[in-house]
Amino acid sequence: MARMGREGRRLWPSCAFLFWRALGSILMGFSAIDRVLVLHAMQRGVTVPCVLPPRVGTLVVESRYQMMDLSTTSVLAAKAYKYKAESLVKEYLLADSYVSYTAVLGGILMCKMAYDITSIISLLYYKGYGSLTKTQKLEWNNRGMSTIHAIFITVMSVYLVFFSNLFSDQLDGPVTFRSSNLSIFTLGVSVGYFIADLAMIFWAYPSLGGMEYVLHHMLSLISVVFAMYSGEGQLYTYMCLISEITTPGINLRWFLDTAGMKKSKAYLVNGFTMFVAWLVARIILFVYLFYHIYFHYDQVKQMHTFSCILVFSVPTILLVMNIMWFAKILRGLKKTLAKRQ
C-alpha cells in the first residue's frame, strides 16, 4: 500500500499536466499553452507524458539548450484565456437571446447562496439559531433569501422607473414597449427568485405561507415572465416590484418575534417603519400606477391583449390584497401600542 501511495504521488503531477494541457488545448489550441505547461513541468522536475505531439517533444529537447522567456509566454496565455472568457460572456451569457435565461439561472443560484449564507451567519452570530426547530430554520433562511432579493429588486426598480431615462416621457415612442438588456436581466433575476420561493412554499406547505402567498407569487411570476419575454409593460411591472421594499421590514418583524424580542423597542420601531413603507409602496404607489395607466391609455391599448389583461388585473388584485394586509398591520400596530400604555 505504501508503494502504491508513493507511485500515486509520482503519477499525480503527470496526470495534472495532462488535464490542464487538454483543457488549454480545447480553449486555445496547442500554441502558447503547450510551451507554458511543458517548461513549467520541466522546472519542477515533473515527467512530461510521452503522448505529447512531436512538435511539443521537439520543444522539450530544444528548451534544454535555449532559454525561453516564460513570463512573457505566461502573460500571453493568460490574456488568451481572458479573451476567451470575455467572448463567452458577451457572445453567449449576456447576448440578447440568452440574457433572460442567464438571469433566471443567476436568480436561482442567488437564492441558493443567500439561503446558505443566512444559515451560516445566523449560526455564527445568533446563539438561539441552533435551538430553532427544523421548520423554523427553514423559514428563517427563506426569509433571509427573500430579504436579499427584495433589496436587489427594489434598488433596480427605483433606478429604472425614476432615475433612468428608459421610461421617460421625453423620449419618442410608447413607454409601454420600452425595455433594455438591464431591465430584462433584472426581471430574469426576479423570475429566478419567484421560482425558487414557490418551490420552497410548495415543498413545505403551509409552513412558509398559505394560498394567499401562492396567489401573490403566481401572479407576480406570470406578469414578470411575460413582461420579460414580450418587452411590453415593463414600467408597470417595475412599479409593482417596488412594493418589495416592505419585505425586509416584514421579515425583520418575524425575526424579532422568533428571537423573543416582541416587547423590545426595535420591534415597535420596525412596526412603525413597516406601516409607513406599506402605505407608500403598496397603497399610494399603486394609486399612482393606475393614474399613469389612465393618462397613457392610448399607449397601453397598443399592447398585446394578454399584456393589457395583466396590466389591469394583476395590480388590481395585488392592491386588494395589499389593503387587506395593511388592515392587519394597522390592527397589529394598535394592539402593540395599547399594550405599552
Image (cartoon, rainbow, N blue to C red):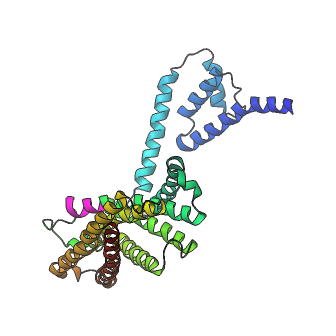
**Is residue 227 rendered to the left or right of residue 38?**
left
Residue drawn where x is 57% and y is 44% of the image = 26
Image location of residue 341, percent across then percent down = 30, 68
Q: Where residue 66 sits: x, y (%)?
A: 57, 16
Question: Majority secondary structure of the magenta segment?
Answer: helix
Quadrant hosting residue 186:
bottom left
Q: Residue furthest left?
A: 170
| Above or below for 244 versus 83 | below
Relative placement, left or right, of 244 versus 193 is left
Q: How many marks?
A: 0
Residue 160 lies in the magenta stretch: yes
Q: Residue at x 32, y 71 (%)?
A: 338
Look at the image and tell me in which quarter the N terminus lies. Answer: top right
27 or 265: nearer the viewer: 265
Q: Position of residue 202 (x, y in %)?
A: 54, 74
Q: Is residue 335 magenta?
A: no
- Judge whether 202 appears above or below 47 on screen: below
Please indicate whether residue 244 sits to the left or right of residue 92 in the image: left
Pick whichever, 192 or 232, lies toward us.
192
| Span of residues in magenta | 156-165
In this orientation, does residue 239 appear?
no
Q: Position of residue 251 (x, y in %)?
A: 41, 63
Q: Is residue 103 above or below residue 334?
A: above
Near-viewer residue (200 or 14) = 200
- Which residue does the image show at 75% across and 28% down from the upper left? 10
Residue found farthest to the front: 341
Q: Residue at x 43, y 48 (%)?
A: 87
